[in-house]
Image (cartoon, grey):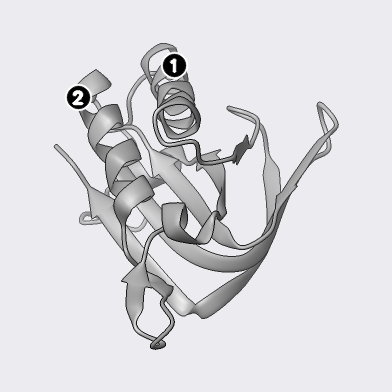
Amino acid sequence: MKAVVQRVNHAKISVKVPHYEAAIGAGYCVLLGIMEGDGEAQAQWIAKKLAHLRIFRDQDDKMNSSILDTQGEILLVSQFTLAGDCSKGNRPSFIQAAHPKIAEPLVKLVGELLQTLYKVPVKTGVFGAMMNIELSNDGPVTLILERD
């Protein structure tokens, strides 16, 4: 499982078909890629890491606060292209991406864990849809999380 985590001032996602929009204030925009072989253990690890990751500024202006401390929100977006392998040729190979029947429930599980276990408000994209994301990256702070 791979996640690109961007600390944001705000973020918005929109889908033309089916029509859908969601927006968050300060928090994370998380692009989540589910890899072949991923399961519940990886989903639990990613959710816990996102909830406890200390990349927000504290009262001393140090990156020492979590999304729990700041009461931020998460925009969680399924992103199968994170599984793309560009090591050979110029066209990415996506054979490491999990099948949608596996990936979609795991993306939902990460969102549910964040909301139920950690009480983090989560908005999502639309699985498999073409999505547009607008965001204001705060810092900028962008991290990549991976869990095999």
Report the mark closest to the observer, 2 or 1: 2
What residue is shown at x 31% (from left), y 57% (from top)?
Answer: 53
Q: Is residue 31 above or below residue 70?
A: above
Q: Position of residue 54 (x, y in %)?
A: 32, 64
Q: Is residue 10 visible?
A: yes
Neighbour tally class for label 1: few under 14, some 14-19, many 20 plus, Cα within 10 Å: some
Q: Is 137 placed left or right of 1 in the picture?
A: right
| First in residue order: circle 2 vs circle 1 | 2
Q: Is residue 39 visible?
A: no
Q: Is 3 placed left or right of 73 in the picture?
A: left
Q: Is 100 placed left or right of 46 in the picture?
A: right
Q: Position of residue 40 (x, y in %)?
A: 26, 20
Quadrant position of residue 134: bottom right
What residue is shown at x 31% (from left), y 52% (from top)?
Answer: 52
What residue is shown at x 38% (from left), y 88% (from top)?
Answer: 60
CA gap, disc 2 to disc 1?
Answer: 13 Å
Task: Tell me the residue that label 1 is attached to.
Answer: 105
Q: Position of residue 104 (x, y in %)?
A: 47, 20
Q: Classify the position of the C terminus by image quarter.
A: top left
Q: Is residue 32 above or below residue 52?
A: above
* Three-letter code, disc 1: Pro
Task: Tell me the residue that label 2 is attached to.
Answer: 41
* Three-letter code, disc 2: Ala
Q: Residue furthest front?
A: 59
